[in-house]
Image (cartoon, rainbow, N blue to C red):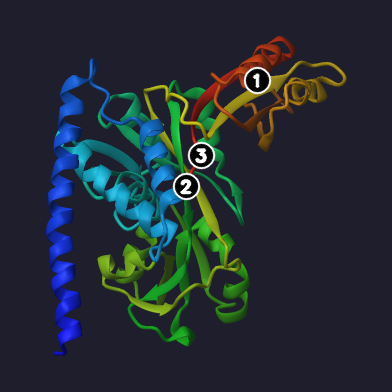
């Protein structure tokens, strides 16, 4: 070992000791803040978003902004757990992208509750069984998750945050002989995300949609001549081989998840507001829904129509706009929107995903 290498390692040891001391000082302050709070609210999404934004802005490298965000998410997770452990329901079983989204947002010091369906995630949060829920709402390739939108319309829960998760699909199997694979299991969304690859490489294999990719991996582990499309994290969990990685048709394939809870989130300075509304039954009614936004300079980032389930050919419109509902121009636009819309429900304001 050279003198230079020894010197570098000595410096690393010294820095590690200093980091450990600083981590514990931060944890002690987090505990003190927990004692000073006047209510039982453990998670402050706006505060955590501000911390992540600040450290990424101040980051001089060589760590990437994404690496810095991941590090500080985990630090906040461990400090938060000293105050009170958080529980989060997600679409299970273990090994799903929903679990990965929960870990990305809350860190490893969270108690995950795998749920069989999206409905079960909503029910777990509504009943108070868990603090928060993580549900997929849209995919960049396959579009909106209809069941999530339908439940948002009915549920009293608030949207407290969002997570953007890069989704890389893998073909998993016990035996990675493509010629022997007769059945491919996966969630319908994942099958759709990989249809070009499947057409080219497994054109004769039956495609069986299931409730989750993790369930697909479990079946593939138990069924001869079958495979699953799932994330790489499911391979080790179910004892499968990774036959082919990154088989999604779009390399930028991303799924957006929503964090559901029972609390309203204060402004962070970089927020988004989600709402759902319906138009009055008269000419130009849909156009009138957009006028208040334009008038007050509020940008719309998403507009999605969905059958209202209240009558034939009746629709509701899900919308995301920039800004918090407490911001002046957003508040003014929402007041006027309620005057022209037949129905308006604000689903929540929350920090934009980092």
Q: Earlier in the sequence, mark 1 or mark 2?
A: 1
Q: Is residue 281 left or right of residue 218?
A: right
Please rate how many residues cluster around mark 2, counting C-alpha atoms within 10 Å: few if below 14, some from 14 to 19, many from 20. Answer: some
Indicate whether 170 appears above or below 85. Answer: below
Q: Left or right of 282: which side holds 238?
A: left
Residue named by callout 3 = 352
Is the Cβ of the residue at disc 2 closer than 8 Å to that at disc 3? yes
Q: Which mark is residue 246?
A: none
Query: In the picture provided, is 92 more to the left or to the right than 353?
Result: left
Along the line of sight, the residue nearer the viewer: 65 or 205: 65
Q: Which residue is mark 1?
A: 329
Q: Residues within 10 Å of mark 1 (few under 14, many from 20)?
A: some
Q: Quadrant of the N terminus?
A: bottom left
From what the image shows, is residue 278 above or below residue 220?
above
Look at discs 1 and 3 and give the one toward the viewer. 1
Circle 1/circle 3 CB separation < 8 Å:
no
Task: Tell me the residue at 55%/44% (across/down).
Answer: 145
Secondary element under disc 2, as helix, strand or loop, is loop
Q: Element under label 3?
A: loop
Residue at 61% in and 54% down: 142
Q: Is residue 159 above or below residue 229?
A: above
Instruction: Quote the CA–CA distance across marks 1 and 3.
Output: 18 Å
Disc 2 designates what residue?
354
Instruction: Please identify the quarter of the rendering in which residue 82 is found.
Output: top left
Can you give x and y, in whole percent of width and height, for residue 196 in the image?
63, 71
Residue 2 sits above or below residue 222 on the image: below
The quarter holding residue 297 reads top right
- Give the Cα separation between the discs numbered 1 and 2: 24 Å
Tell me where residue 261 appears, x and y as whole percent.
Answer: 37, 28
């Amino acid at each position: 070992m050279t003198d230079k290498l020894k010197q570098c390692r000595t410096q690393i040891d010294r820095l590690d000791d200093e980091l450990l001391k600083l981590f514990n000082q931060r944890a002690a302050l987090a505990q003190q803040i927990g004692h000073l709070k006047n209510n039982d609210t453990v998670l402050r999404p706006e505060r955590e978003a501000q911390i992540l934004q600040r450290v990424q802005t101040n980051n001089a490298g060589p760590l990437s902004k994404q690496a810095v965000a991941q590090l500080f998410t985990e630090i906040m997770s461990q400090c938060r757990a000293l105050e009170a452990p958080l529980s989060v329901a997600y679409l299970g079983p273990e090994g799903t992208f929903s679990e990965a989204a929960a870990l990305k947002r809350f860190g490893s010091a969270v108690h995950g509750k795998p749920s069989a369906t999206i409905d079960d995630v909503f029910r777990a949060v509504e009943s108070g069984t868990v603090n928060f829920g993580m549900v997929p709402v849209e995919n960049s390739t396959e579009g909106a998750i209809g069941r999530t939108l339908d439940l948002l319309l009915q549920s009293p829960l608030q949207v407290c945050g969002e997570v953007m998760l890069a989704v890389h699909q893998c073909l998993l199997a016990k035996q990675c002989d493509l010629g022997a694979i007769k059945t491919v299991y996966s969630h319908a969304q994942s099958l759709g995300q990989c249809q070009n690859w499947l057409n080219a490489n497994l054109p004769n294999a039956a495609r069986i949609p299931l409730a989750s990719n993790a369930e697909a991996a479990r079946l593939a582990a138990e069924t001869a001549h079958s495979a699953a499309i799932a994330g790489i994290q499911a391979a080790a969990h179910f004892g499968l081989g990774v036959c082919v990685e990154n088989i999604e048709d779009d390399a930028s394939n991303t799924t957006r998840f929503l964090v559901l809870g029972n609390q309203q989130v204060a402004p962070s300075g970089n927020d988004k507001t989600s709402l759902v509304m319906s138009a009055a039954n008269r000419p130009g009614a849909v156009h009138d829904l957009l006028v208040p936004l334009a008038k007050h300079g509020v940008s719309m980032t998403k507009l999605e129509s969905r059958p209202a389930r209240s009558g034939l050919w009746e629709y509701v419109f899900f919308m995301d706009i920039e800004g918090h509902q407490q911001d002046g121009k957003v508040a003014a636009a929402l007041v006027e929107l309620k005057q022209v819309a037949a129905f308006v429900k604000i689903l929540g304001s929350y920090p934009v995903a980092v």
